[in-house]
Structures are given as C-alpha cells and as structure tokens.
Image (spheres, rainbow, N blue to C red):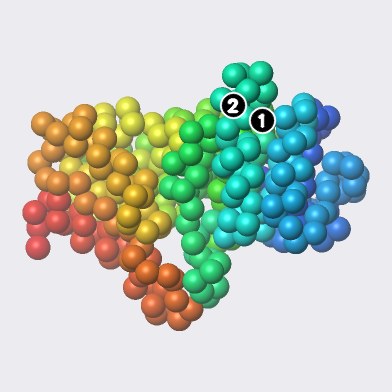
Amino acid sequence: MREIQFREALREALNEEMRRDPLVYLMGEEVAEYNGAYKVSQGMLDEFGPERVIDTPIAELGFAGIGIGSAINGLRPIIEFMTFNFSLVAIDQVINSAAKVMSMSGGQYSCPIVFRGPTGNAGMLSSQHSQNFENWFANTPGLKVVVPSNPYDAKGLLKSCIRDNDPVIFMESELMYGDKGQVPEEEYLIPIGKANIVREGNDVTIVSFGKIMKVAIAAAEELAKNGVSAEVIDLRSVRPIDYDTVISSVKKTNRCVVVEEAWPLSAISSELTYNIQRNAFDYLDAPVIRVNSMDLPLPYAPTLIEAILPNVKRTIQAVDAVLYKK
C-alpha cells in the first residue's frame, strides 16, 4: 500500500467526490489560485474550473452563508476555513442556519454541507490562532463533528462527510498536513460515528482524537516499556460519539484516561467521563482522569506551549494515577 501525506489524502477525497458528483464544489480563502493555504486543493482549479473551486474574500460570515444557501437549494458545498479560529466570524450561520434548517423546516429541507479546516495549536501562533472548538460545535444539535488523526481516516471520513445529508464540521490540523500514512488506491469510506481501537491493551483505556492521538500512542508505547498494557481508542468523531466502544474497553481495563487538547470546562472529555461513570461505574477501579490543556489562552513561547498542552509526560502521570502508582 502506498504512503501519502495527510494533505494528499484530503485532496484525493475532494477530487474523487467532485468527479463523482457535479453538485459538489469547494469554496474558501485561497483555495483556487493559490492552490490552498496548506496546498490541500493544489491543482483542483485546473481540473474543475472557477465555478467549482471558488476563491472568496476574507469574509467567513458571507461565504459560509452563501454555501449554506446553496446546500439548502440542492448543491453540496465544501467550505474551507483557513483556520477554525476564523469560523467564529461565521458561527451564527453555522449554528443558527445550517444546523437548524432540518428541524425548523419539519424535515422539508436538508443542508448537506461540509465546513473543514485546521483546529488547535499549530506552533507559535499565540492566543487567537491556537484554539479548539470541537466541543463548541459538538454541543449543537443538527451538526456532526469529525476529527481525523491520520491520512487513512482523513480520506475515508471526508468522503463520507461529503456524501452525508447533514451539515458536518471536519477538523484537521496544520501540524498534520505533512504527516504520512498508508492509504489504499481503491475507493473506501469510513462511517461517521465509529471509533477505532488503534492499540489493544488490558490495564488502562486511553481515549483521544485528532492530532492528540500522537500523544496517546506515544504514551502507550512508553508505558509498554514498563509493563503497562494500554488500550488506545481514537474517537474519530465527537458528534456522534461512539460510547459503546469506549464503555466496552473500560469494562475490560477498569481504568480510563481521556486526553484532549481543548480547555477542561465542558470539554468532550467531560462528556466521556460522565458517560463512563454512568454506564460503567461498577467496573471502574479508579476515577477517570482527564488530560486537557490548561485553562488559559495559549501563549507564544514554545516552552509555555509545551507546558500548557497535553503531552506524553502528563498522560503517563495520569495513567500512573489511575493505576495507583507514584
């Protein structure tokens, strides 16, 4: 099986779906003439032309609204935000229009649209460009929220999202676009809402999603050197959440650590912790521990970024705590 970059996997998904369905189009800042801010849409303007690969002004509220209107009227737009930090400018359109039109119309109208782009920390970008909003969007009925962690999942999930009849938030990472992974040449789809057990284990369950899966996997590898068998679960999507896979794992390992980049208050990890104690309380041998970013805006200095974000050291410390080790 060939190995390609995360951005190439996304590009293949976009190209394949646009070739398959003429109603699909891509719109956003710098997606056409510049080949995409992160070169995800490289070469797409040449193949599909300016009617289907559309450059926009720096006006997220405007082009998000245009995309939603076109989706309600039968097209299948993919709206790229240069970063989900900028999606806050368009959040009224996403939440009050895209997410609610099915309910408000009594099922007469759907809104098959994908909003995609990078989320979270991407290095020294400081407070206003380093935020995670997965839990914000996941708190909205009517939206689906997908956060892939590797090229294989990115392609299969994006294709499923484009074909879905509901509005989908598809969150990537600037720090993953260059990551390489094995991706089949033949077509495949990954269903939305099905978690992936990326590493089996018996002593503790580690749950994460998106680029923080790198932290979870690295921590599990370090723990294995000391005889601790960690089961690692990649949620893949945070609305819907595959509770069944998580609960089944916790019933086997009896301990759980959830690792998430977002701030701790009302996070996805909070929701998981509640559901674990509600559905697997009698199986727990220790309280669930969450490893989140510290509760403050992300600074600029690399040393402070490392201290504030979830990392391998903090994850191992959390596992040691649920195992009642020093």
Q: Secondary structure at mark 1?
A: loop
Q: Report crowding for label 1: few under 14, some 14 to 19, many 20 or more residues within 10 A (C-alpha).
A: many
* Residue at the spot of label 2: 104
| Residue in view at x 9 percent, y 63 percent | 326
Residue situated in front as seen by the camera: 119 or 109: 109
Q: Which mark is residue 241?
A: none
Q: Quadrant of the N terminus?
A: top right
121 relative position to 154: left or right:
left
Residue situated in front as seen by the camera: 63 or 293: 63
Q: Are marks 2 and 1 in contact (CB under 8 Å)?
A: no
Which quarter of the figure has residue 162? top right
26 relative position to 102: left or right:
right
Mark 2: amino acid:
Met
268 relative position to 150: left or right:
left
Count of picture labels:
2
Q: Report crowding for label 2: few under 14, some 14 to 19, many 20 or more residues within 10 A (C-alpha).
A: few
First in sequence, mark 2 or 1: give its number: 2
Residue situated in front as seen by the camera: 96 or 229: 96
Residue 31 on image: x %, y %? 78, 54
Mark 1: amino acid:
Cys
Q: Residue furthest front?
A: 104
Residue 270 on image: x %, y %? 30, 46
| Residue in view at x 13 percent, y 38 percent | 284
* Residue at the spot of label 1: 111
Residue 191 on image: x %, y %? 53, 28
Residue 267 on image: x %, y %? 36, 50
Q: CA distance from mark 2 to mark 1?
A: 12 Å
